[in-house]
């Protein structure tokens, strides 16, 4: 069972998903701590309601100081909108979810609704999400799980976002279960730089 830290910047929808799946027995993880870089993030209130230790920390150093007090195997970036640099001991143990099928619509500047607007502008008929290990370069770490969604000609960026988020709710827990089953090193060793 993975011991996870959840880093978030917003409403905590991914935290909700993790909490429900852990309670339902379909996610082999325990949430040890939740940290937000936004002081009044709704996700922090949700974490407290669920009974998880919840903290505000503005930068990497402050976040890592909090994490050192908890036993953590994996750090999950769950809508965390800042480049995160983990402590050296967890450098290969940070998992992120990106709202496109990497390598499309990925990299610096591609996040949230910007991705969905770009997908719409390009006229794509397929989009999706990618769960991957984070590295020092945006969206370039080893891929764990990808889920695709079909798009319609009439879909708005908001429609695309809703379809992709539904896929994310399946993909992120699946990815964590795969990491739990195969170990972190499996994913880093299966790709070439």
Image (cartoon, rainbow, N blue to C red):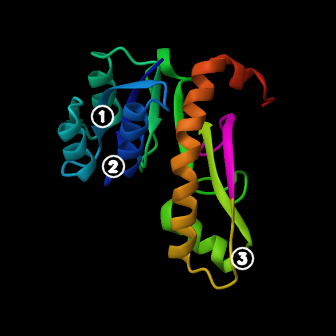
Give the image location of residue 92, x and y in percent.
Answer: 57, 23
Residue located farthest toward the bottom when viewing the structure as drawn: 154
- Of badges 2 and 3, nearer the viewer stands 2
Q: CA distance from mark 1 to mark 2?
A: 10 Å
Q: Earlier in the sequence, mark 2 or mark 3?
A: 2
Q: CA distance from mark 2 to mark 3?
A: 29 Å
User: Is 114 within the magenta?
Assistant: no
Residue located farthest toward the front when viewing the structure as drawn: 24
Q: Which residues are magenta?
A: 135-148
User: What is the crowding at mark 1: few (fewer than 14 residues within 10 Å), some, or many (at least 20)?
Assistant: many
User: Is 138 within the magenta?
Assistant: yes
**Label ID, residue 34:** 1
- Above or below, 159 against 188 in this view is below
Secondary element under disc 1, as helix, strand or loop, is strand
Q: Are marks 2 and 3 in contact (CB under 8 Å)?
A: no
User: Disc 2 marks which residue?
Assistant: 12
Q: Earlier in the sequence, mark 1 or mark 3?
A: 1
Residue for point 72% across, 78% down: 123
Q: Are marks 1 and 3 in contact (CB under 8 Å)?
A: no
Give the image location of residue 11, x and y in percent.
Answer: 31, 54
Q: Quick one: quadrant of the C terminus?
A: top right
Q: CA distance from mark 1 to mark 3?
A: 36 Å
Residue for point 64% across, 85% down: 154
Q: Earlier in the sequence, mark 1 or mark 2?
A: 2
Q: Specify whether 76 is left or right of 157.
A: left
Residue for point 27% across, 24% down: 66
Q: Is residue 136 visible?
A: no
Give the image location of residue 140, x and y in percent.
Answer: 66, 41
User: Disc 3 marks which residue?
Assistant: 122
Q: Are marks 1 and 2 in contact (CB under 8 Å)?
A: yes
User: What is the crowding at mark 2: few (fewer than 14 residues within 10 Å), some, or many (at least 20)?
Assistant: many
């Amino acid at each position: 069972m993975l011991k996870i830290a959840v880093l978030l910047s917003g409403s905590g929808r991914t935290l909700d998903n993790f909490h429900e799946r852990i309670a339902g027995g379909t996610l082999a993880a325990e949430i040890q701590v939740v940290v937000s870089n936004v002081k009044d993030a709704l996700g922090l209130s949700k974490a407290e309601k669920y009974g998880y230790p919840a903290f505000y920390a503005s930068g990497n150093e402050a976040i890592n100081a909090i994490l050192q007090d908890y036993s953590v195997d994996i750090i999950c970036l769950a809508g965390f909108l800042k480049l995160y640099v983990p402590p050296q001991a967890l450098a290969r143990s940070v998992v992120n979810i990106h709202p496109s099928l990497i390598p499309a619509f990925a990299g610096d500047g591609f996040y949230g609704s910007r991705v969905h607007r770009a997908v719409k502008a390009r006229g794509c008929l397929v989009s999706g999400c990618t769960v991957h290990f984070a590295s020092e370069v945006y969206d370039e770490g080893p891929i764990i799980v990808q889920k695709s969604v079909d798009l319609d000609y009439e879909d708005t960026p908001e429609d695309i976002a809703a379809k992709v988020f539904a896929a994310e709710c399946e993909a992120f827990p699946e990815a964590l279960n795969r990491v739990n089953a195969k170990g972190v090193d499996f994913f880093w060793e299966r790709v070439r730089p």
